[in-house]
Image (cartoon, helix red, strand yellow):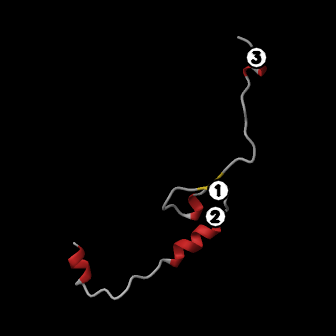
Amino acid sequence: MLGAFLHSGITGIGTDYVSVAVQQLIDLRDICLIGGRAHHAMHQAWFVIVARKSNQPRR
């Protein structure tokens, strides 16, 4: 397989700068899947909601 790649006449492999630009549009607090797009990102909550059993009504 490596021999087919070396003898294929490819002179160079370019870098995909579009993916770098998309990565920079997303803030550090955002979550997105690897290989996802910027509009697929989800924001993390700024605070954590904790459910306490002592504050729940009794049954």
- Give residue 11's position: percent from left, percent from top: 34, 88
Q: Residues within 10 Å of mark 1 (few under 14, many from 20)?
A: few
In the image: residue 15, left or right of residue 27: left
- In which image quadrant can residue 30 be found? bottom right
The reply, left or right, for residue 6 in relation to residue 51 is left
Q: Amino acid at mark 2?
A: Ile
Q: Which residue is mark 3?
A: 57
Circles 2 and 1 in contact, beta carbons < 8 Å: yes
Q: CA distance from mark 3 to mark 1?
A: 35 Å
**On the rendered image, what quadrant is the C terminus found in?**
top right
Residue 7: give x, y in percent of width and height.
22, 84
* Mark toward the viewer: 3 or 2: 2
Q: Give the amino acid type for the residue marked by disc 1 in the picture.
A: Asp
Q: Residue at x 22, y 72 (%)?
A: 1
Where is 35 relative to 46, above or below? Answer: below
Instruction: Report the disc number at residue 26.
Output: 2
